Amino acid sequence: MSTLIDLSHNVTEGMQTYPGLPVPRYGSVLTRENSRGKYAPGVEFTIGSVELCTNTGTYLDTPFHRYADGHDLAQLPLGACVDLRLVLIEHPTGGAPASLLDGLDVTGAAVVFRTGWSIHWGTDRYFANDHPYVTAECSQRLVDQGAVLVGIDSLNIDGTAGSDRPAHSLLLSAGIPIVEHLTNLDSVPVSGARFTAVPVKMVGLGTFPVRAFATVPSRPTVCEVVVDCYNPRALSAFWAEVVRGQVIVRSDDWATVHEPVPGNLLLAFQRVPESKSVKNRVHLDIWSSDISADTARLVSLGAVANGGIVDDEHGPFQVLTDPEGNEFCLVH
């Protein structure tokens, strides 16, 4: 079972999120006392009301916040704010430079800057102009490299010493929503987490509070499958094509293949002196939506098909061997 980590500040009556903006005011449409007598004996309700600036607490900006022709909250695609791969970047002071993105894959990801500034929440220090922020150069790199959402646990994703707002301008013009005033990011692991921040579907508004949270997949009991082989580099490259994963070669004696979905099975390949001589006692089954096409693709990469596709009461499958003779199956 996955672990959920709350990344949102509480919203309380009279709290201040940003200097100069009105604070939330609570009211009552129906009190518990007034509801008595309207329902069966012992049944009572309360219905509240709130006067709320849309930039309150932890909130999400859509392009309409900055641009009159940008999409509003009601047009925000759920795919831009729900269950995104989370790329967490440490940035404690000043403006985040573009170099922080060097070597990172942010395509399709929620990129969140963990500054630690949220420890000042509720104090005057939180509103100081020396808060961490994201530079224009870094924002442009995020756009160019395909980030889907950008967040920060600070007062503003832009520097506030001046009146220009390049991060907002660049990101929102590219349709990338921004989540500001996050918290509790120190509880989120550096890799493997997913990010969600969903606002109310409001027509004609560009900003609204969210309940932001990270989803951390549970650690599986089996952490990896290790394959003995003669050439870890070559065999890991082949299996990366099978599962469409990423190869990490530590040495000539050890390599791993990481699947694109966090928390999935890890394949490891270790060099041994002896070659394979008998049938596998354990083999991998690989999902395939088109067994014939995948068989042809893998054969072109060095696999060998053992016979044709078999179709039994459990469904079709194809037995293959990898370039060093290890059996595996494509199943549909």
Image (tube, grey):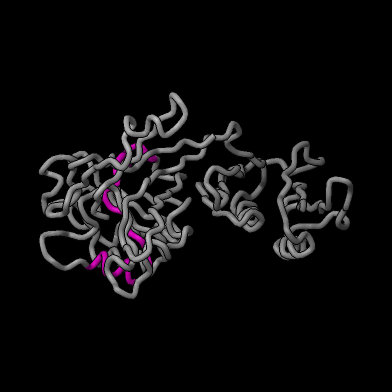
Drawn side of residue 203 relative to residue 237, left or right: left
**Residue drawn at 41 percent across, 52 percent down:** 198
Residue 87 or residue 97, whichever sits in front: 87
**Residue drawn at 15 percent across, 45 percent down:** 126
Residue 248 or residue 93, whichever sits in front: 93
Drawn side of residue 76 relative to residue 19, left or right: right
At which x and y percent is residue 47?
35, 40
Residue 26 or residue 116, whichever sits in front: 26
At which x and y percent is residue 117?
21, 44
Q: Quadrant of residue 183?
A: top left
Furthest residue to the bottom? 69
Residue 294 visible in the picture: yes
**Residue drawn at 13 percent across, 52 percent down:** 19
Which segment did they paint magenta?
Answer: 166-188
With respect to residue 3, does 52 lie above or below? below
> Is 183 inside the magenta-drawn segment?
yes
**Residue drawn at 34 percent across, 63 percent down:** 62
Q: Quadrant of residue 175?
A: bottom left
Drawn side of residue 88 relative to residue 1, left or right: left
The N terminus lies in which quarter of the figure? Answer: top right
Drawn side of residue 38 relative to residue 100, left or right: right
At which x and y percent is residue 91?
25, 50
Residue 29 or residue 49, whichever sits in front: 29
Residue 141 visible in the picture: no
At which x and y percent is residue 265?
60, 42
Furthest residue to the top? 42
